[in-house]
Image (spheres, rainbow, N blue to C red):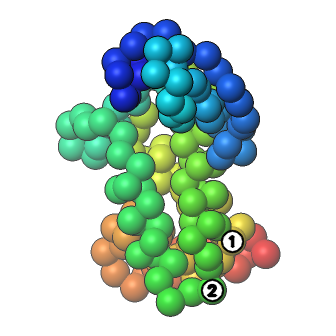
Amino acid sequence: MKCPYCGCEESKVVDSRPTDEGERIRRRRECFNCSKRFTTYEIIETTPVMIVKRDNSRESYNRDKLTNGILRACEKRPISRDEIDSVVDKVEAKIQSSMEREVSSKVVGEYAMEYLKDIDEVAYVRFVSVYRQFKDIHSFLEELNRLVSEK
C-alpha cells in the first residue's frame, strides 16, 4: 500500500478490525520510510450489476436511487434512517446473492416491497402505488384488499 505522505510502497499493518458489520476491514498502517501512520479499508469486490428497466434500457445499479424511493415512501412515518438503510442493505444482499449480472428493476422493486411490508404498511402501500403505477382507485383498492386479506 502506497504511503499518502511520502509515496513509499512499503508499510506494515499495525491494527486491523472489522467495520460495518463485517462488510469492511479497517487497517492502520505504518510507513517503513517516514514512520507515519495512515488508515486503509478493505472491502469485498462485488460484480457490477446492471438494472434492466421497463423499457429494456440498462443502467448501473445505483444505491441512492433505491434509497431515495424508499425514503419518499417512508416520509412522515415513524421509520428510522437505520431501518431504511437496513432495507436497502437486504435488497443489495439479495441482488448480489443471485449472482446475476443483470437484474430487472421489477425484481429490485419486489425485493424492496417484501422488506417494507414488514416494517410499515403505509410506507409499503406508498411504495407499491408508485412502483406499480396504479392507474386508478380500483387498482389501489385491490392492493389494499390483498394486504388486508394477507393479515
Q: Does the residue at mark 1 contact the one at mark 2 (Cβ under 8 Å)?
A: no
Residue 8 to residue 81: above or below:
above
Mark 1 or 2 closer to N-term? 2
Looking at this rendering, what residue extends furthest in the front direction?
34
Amino acid carrying mark 2 in the image: Pro
Residue 48 to residue 123: above or below:
above
Looking at this rendering, what residue extends furthest in the bottom direction?
76
Q: Which mark is residue 78?
A: 2
Residue at (63, 86) in percent of width and height: 78
Distance between mark 1 and mark 2 Cα atoms: 10 Å
- Along the line of sight, the residue nearer the viewer: 144 or 102: 102
Residue 132 seen in this snapshot: no
Residue 45 at x, y percent in the picture: 51, 23
Amino acid carrying mark 1 in the image: Ile
Residue at (57, 71) in percent of width and height: 81
Residue 127 at x, y percent in the picture: 47, 70
Residue at (41, 75) in percent of width and height: 72
- Along the line of sight, the residue nearer the viewer: 42 or 6: 6
Q: Which mark is residue 119?
A: 1
Residue 66 at x, y percent in the picture: 42, 56
Q: Which structural element holds mark 2? A: loop
- Along the line of sight, the residue nearer the viewer: 94 or 64: 64
Residue at (35, 46) in percent of width and height: 62
Residue 75 at x, y percent in the picture: 47, 83
Relative horizontal placement of residue 31, taking residue 117 as reference (left or right):
left
Residue 32 to residue 117: above or below:
above
